[in-house]
Image: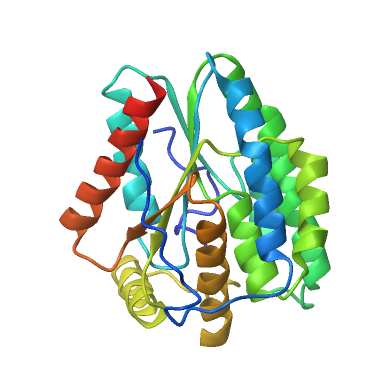
Amino acid sequence: MCNNDPDRPARDAGYRPQRRSFAREGVGSVHGGIHSASSQAGRRESHERSDNQGKGRFITLEGGEGVGKSTNLALVVDHLRARGHEVVATREPGGTPRAEAIRRLLLDPDGEEPLDPDAELLLVFAARAQHLARVVRPALARGAWVVCDRFTDATYAYQGGGRGIEAARIAELEAFVQQGLEPDLTLLLDMPMAAAQQRLDGRLQDQGGARDRFERERDAFFEAVRRAYLVRAEAAPDRMVVIDAGAGLAAVQAELLARLNERLVAWS
């Protein structure tokens, strides 16, 4: 769920995706309502994007554990800064001191009591409310571009797909906290769960870290998270671009920059 530095935020450091049917390809459907909630979110996109015209852009990177979000977030940030944009790099949960405190609570694997899924969901949105108020909205309002490691798609994937919380309940909190704010572009890094877990193990071994509370979940949890992400991507193809994160780093980054550049041209 995180990079291995939980005490600080991430460093401030025309494309039309193929309409693949993930259900037909064996990734399947997930808990009832994710399609519906995604469709409602899609209908809000045009309104939110029109509000952002002349202001900043909001780009998110999504994906399960071990897919390379942190590495590729830095690439996106550098790419945008090289084009003269002010860029705010951030992450969820977290991004502000108080939101980072909530992050530590969410990721702590050694708590004395289990964290109830509903409490987990509410903590995620509490951190998001603080993050939006203190970082994201002010940055967009002054014309900065925000690049965020995870956002609400992760909530539908982890708390919805992984924990089994109904999408309609997540959507209620989304509407209350975000008031229509959604990313202009979401880059979803996707790869098979087993391969991603191997990458995660290698990274933790190299860095001397330990798995956090989410990273200790069973394989079935991560499979459900991946399914939920792909269902959301299929329901919102104009916003979400699926990147094959299982290829080599150079190939992944080439595809990511190509898709990003096509979107930059469309926005210009």
Between 98 and 188, the one lying in front of the other is 188
Q: Residue 231's image quarter?
A: bottom right
> Image point 41% across, 24% down: which residue?
267
Q: Is residue 206 shown left or right of residue 135?
A: left
The quadrant holding residue 117 is bottom right
Q: Residue at x 51, y 80 (%)?
A: 223
Image side of residue 218 versus residue 127, left or right: left
Location of residue 111 by image quarter: bottom right
Image-based side of 179 in relation to 233, left or right = right
Q: Give the image location of residue 75, x and y in percent.
A: 29, 41
Circle count? 0
Percent position of residue 265, x then y: 32, 26
Q: Quadrant of the C terminus?
A: top left
* Residue at figure coordinates x 44%, y 33% from the top left: 12
Is 215 situated above or below 45?
A: below
Residue drawn 77% across and 58% down?
170
Q: Say whether residue 225 is visible.
A: yes
Q: Is residue 96 visible?
A: no
Residue 2 placement (x, y as % from top left): 50, 59
* Percent position of residue 145, x then y: 47, 26
Residue 138 sits above or below residue 256 on the image = above
